[in-house]
Amino acid sequence: MSGEFERTPEGVVATLTPLEAALLRQFVSELRMLLEAEVGAGDGGGDAEAGAGNGGAEADLFASISEIDQDGPVILPDDPVLARLLPDAYPDDPESAGDFRRFTQDRLVARKYAACGAVLAMLPEQEDGPVRVVLDDDGVRDWLGALNDVRLALATRLGVEQDDEDYWEELPDDDPRGAVHEIYRWLGWVQETLVRSAS
Amino acid sequence: MTGPTLTPERTKVVEADTVTTPDLPWVTIVWNDPVNLMSYVSYVFQSHFGYAKEKAEKLMLDVHRLGKAVVSAGSREEMERDVEAMHGYGLWATMRKDS
């Protein structure tokens, strides 16, 4: 399979086909948009539109986060993907869970958002040829985080469960979720090679 | 967890493979989920906690086989930092007072 990461003297390297790069770009972009919408979701408000979608997005995002730090969101997000990425820390104590979320969620969202941005920066749009990715230590950390978050997002949307391989293998060919599940599995393999290269 | 069949190195069983909680009041628990790669979970335990590979693998296998495992113990503030770090890596973690 393509997209395999390996450690070289240059760094941790992989080559993606144009299609693989486009798919990865699409899923990471979608996740980033979902995260972006979560900024400023708390009572403190904050300007979630600040810098949205342009080159200065990260700087403005951090600026708006520092303004709303004390009044971040307190409840589990409605969206199942975000709920999985930002779960409750205290399962039996809603008040402590709310306090924890209020002080940490914006920071978590910003970190995941930045990792998505770092990945997208290495996947140029409308690339006709193969895309070669070379990662230093920061890049490895960003890609591991973003790949894992994208896989969590896809799995949540697909309804992936423990040991459900038979279900996906028996899925009718015309079920569109089959193709997405193939991509989910491919991303798992890419992440596996990245973990091995990073260790 | 998922991923290719992972056989941890067979080494001498060392006391330090588990997390003991003498006088430390709070613990962090990592829960199994169907998405996270076994190799990635082990990597996270080594990276964040600084655990040796053997200990990280043992804890990872505990999460995988038992559904959850205590991965650290300490003050409430320390556990909140650990939980936040685990969520940053995409693991599912919670904390509670040690019983």
Image (cartoon, rainbow, N blue to C red):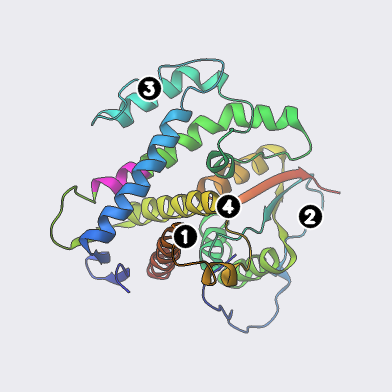
Of the residues shown, which amino acid type is indicated by label 4? Leu
Marks 1,3: beta carbons within 8 A: no
Residue receiving disc 2: B21
**Label 1 vs label 4, nearer the camera:** 1
Identity of the residue drawn at 63% across and 83% down: B11
- Image location of residue A97, percent across then percent down: 69, 33
**Magenta stretch contains residue A120:** yes
Of the residues shown, which amino acid type is indicated by label 1? Asp
Q: Earlier in the sequence, mark 4 or mark 2?
A: 2
Spatial CA span between label 3 and label 2: 40 Å
- Image location of residue A109, percent across then percent down: 47, 35
Image: B64 above or below B29: below
Secondary structure of residue under mark 2:
loop
**Magenta stretch contains residue A29:** no
Q: Is A79 left, or right, of A119 in this rendering?
A: right
Q: Chain of mark 4?
A: B
**Label 3 vs label 4, nearer the camera:** 4
Residue A63 is labelled as: 3
Q: Label 1 neighbourhood size at 10 Å, few (<14), some (14-19), many (20+)?
A: few
Secondary structure of residue under mark 4:
loop
Q: Label 3 neighbourhood size at 10 Å, few (<14), some (14-19), many (20+)?
A: some
Residue receiving disc 4: B91
Of the residues shown, which amino acid type is indicated by label 2? Thr
